[in-house]
Image (cartoon, helix red, strand yellow):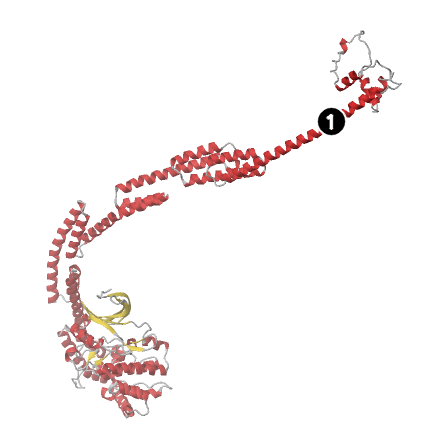
Amino acid sequence: MIEVPGYTIVRKIGEGGMATVYLAVQQSLGRRVALKVIKSTQINDSNFNDRFLKEGRIIAQFQHPQIITIYDFGSNGPHSYFSMEFLPEGTLAQHIERGLSPERALEIIKSVSGALAYAHRRGVIHRDIKPQNILFRQDGTPVLSDFGIAKIVDADDTQLTAPGLAIGSPVYMSPEQITGKPLDSRSDLYSLGIVFYEMLVREPPYRADDVISIAMMHCTQPLPRLPDGLGRFQPVLQKLLAKTPAERFETAEQLIDALDHPESSASLRNLIDTARMDQTLGGALFSKKSGLIGGLSLLAMLVGGGVYLALNRQPVDSYEQLALKHFQNGEFTQSLELVKLGLAASPEDGRLLALRERAERYRSAADLLEQARQNRRDGSFEQGLRRVEDGLRQVPDHGELLALRQALQTQLRERQGEADRLLAQAHARWQAGDLEGGLQAAEQGLQRAPDHPELSTLRTVLQNRLKERQLVPQLVDTVRELLRQGRLEDSLKRIEDGLLMVPEQPDLLELRRQASAAIAANQRIDELLRDCANRFPLERLTGQQGGEIAACYRQIAALAPDPDRVRAALQQVGDRYAELADAAIRKADLQLAGDYLAQLALIQSGHPRLATLNHLLQTKRKQAESEARRAVEEEAKRQAVEDAKRRGAEDAKRRAIEKALSEPAPANIQARPKAPATTVLKSELNPSPKPAKPRPELAGPSRQKGPKTHCREALLKAQLGEPLSATEQEECQP
């Protein structure tokens, strides 16, 4: 893509035979523009740029709502350019394809006529009126654009194109434009008539498969009749498309008046006669007698630039002579156009075929010569020499190409020697560690030899080395931050990438050692964590394992102080002990709860639930102690009541005994020696220990018999009115 100073090209939006249109941004104002670039090499005129710039100044001064605004113009090497307002709503050709109403077509044609009237009053002929050059703003306003091949009327030194050369679009060109005759504003009106016809019918009036046939139809064929319903526009089109300029509207203002007042306009008088003349001319040119040759003869006379040729001579000779003249003048494109006309009449003419082949070769050689010269100016000697060689294959004896080849070869040898010297210098500085100096030498060498492959490669290598050197401090900082975050794998990858760029860099080597050690430590930590988890599963923790658990995880912390994974594992264990302690407290198993909390303190002294659970445990203990004291007190009270009852019963018993002893014994009870009352009372209240019962084997005949000891109690029971058992009654009866 080309470069135009002051503009940033975005994309190509159109292309024609002589120009390319780009969407670009004008850097100074930041606005979007349409940038039309014309190749001046397409026009064989050494003064093209001077005339282009001179006419551009005139056209750029136009201020009309239906004429595109030109912001800038100029030349850049072989290219000349226009900078214009960018109109994104499409061309008239696109609108025609979608279809236009007659009213809309009339509105557009009057707007464009107003633009042409403005330009014609200022002496400018557009010369390329066609649907593609009529654009639309967002509000639907038609805008006439593309004054790139315009001509200043009556200005001999400012005519953009060479006399006799037909430039434009053949489908819309006037007969005088086709034949290379002098033009005036009426030629634009003819082209506008073709556009008007196409808007109404959706196709131009003259159509053919080749340019030559279309050109002949413009010069000879009468205007076709409009379809039914459009007949009111036929008179206007008939006058617009008259073959002779004198028979057309004189000005665009007359056209506008005829469009606004078709029934009363003086400009439409005698249109019937004009139409008849056109039909008669066309009929004569294409009659059965004259046939195609007659039309070609007329066209030959027209192309000859006003030189009338006898009808009885073959037009082929005229084409050959004119083509040869242009060829000798170095106007190869014009020569080829004339050869095409001649071959249309005589396709097998050997002289014309030979001239065409020669003109094509010379035109190709001329193009290559100009390109090679530009390459030389740009310093691209190798590319220029290749184009010279291509040109010499077309024309081996081309003097200018031969001279340019010799000059390029000499310059290449000189440049190659200087480039080789700078290449050696760049290598030496690189080996000495002077990357900046080596790069500077390589750049100098490429300034002299832009296509030098070794210098290009060395420059790239040195640029990369410098970038890598500049990136090392930043890379080191990045790796350190990754290590701080614990992203060991990422840090190691960055380190390895850096060492590929700068092998044996000390900081990176040290960081690699640290990262590798940290990764190994992490692997060991993972193993130990798994071991601790297997030894002390959460579901089987007891109230005596805290010390062992703490010791297990302490060895892990020694490998990597305060690692997240160790904290997480201890947190799980601590949470489990907290759950166990909480459950024991709820079950009132305060001893077990205390054991669990003691283990929790060993494992994680800062556990968030430790203080709360300890407080709850102490509260439960105080409650238990209080309840125990109350139970003791209640038991003491109960015992005191029972003791009081017992003492009361003993007192009552004592009184009963005393009473019984004081009364006489019943008659049925054998009298016994009466002991003193005090003695009996004492014996009853304080009974003596019973003597040990003698063993049977020790009892002998000598043992004395006496009243049975239980009879005393029976006596008392009888005295108290208590019933006696059968044994007591039997043994204690007198």
Residue 358 place in picture, x, y as percent = 16, 71
Tag count in the figure?
A: 1
The vertical placement of 121 against 270, above or below, is above
Q: In this view, does 323 lie above or below 619?
A: below
Give the amino acid type for the residue marked by disc 1 in the picture.
Arg
According to the picture, the residue beneath numbered tag 1 turns out to be 646
> Can see residue 350?
no
Res 528 → quadrant:
top left
Q: Is residue 509 toward the left or the right of residue 326 in the image?
A: right
Please state which of residues 44 and 54 is positioned toward the viewer in this rendering.
54
Horizontal side, residue 482 vs residue 121: left or right: right
- Determine the residue located farthest toward the right in the rendered image: 667
Residue visible at 20% across and 79% down in the picture: 151
SS category of the residue bearing label 1? helix
Query: Which residue is more in the foreground, 724 or 634?
Result: 634
Q: Nearer the viewer, residue 64 or 277?
A: 64
Q: Quadrant of the N terminus?
A: bottom left
Is residue 372 shown left or right of residue 524? left
Using a 10 Å C-alpha cutoff, classify the residue at mark 1 as few (fewer than 14 neighbours), some (14 to 19) or many (20 or more): few
Left or right of 442? Residue 649 is right
Q: Is residue 541 above or below residue 372?
A: above
Q: Where's the C terminus, which quadrant?
A: top right
Residue 618 on image: x %, y %? 54, 36
Q: In which quarter of the image is residue 684?
A: top right
Provide residue 571's location: percent of width, then percent of height: 46, 40
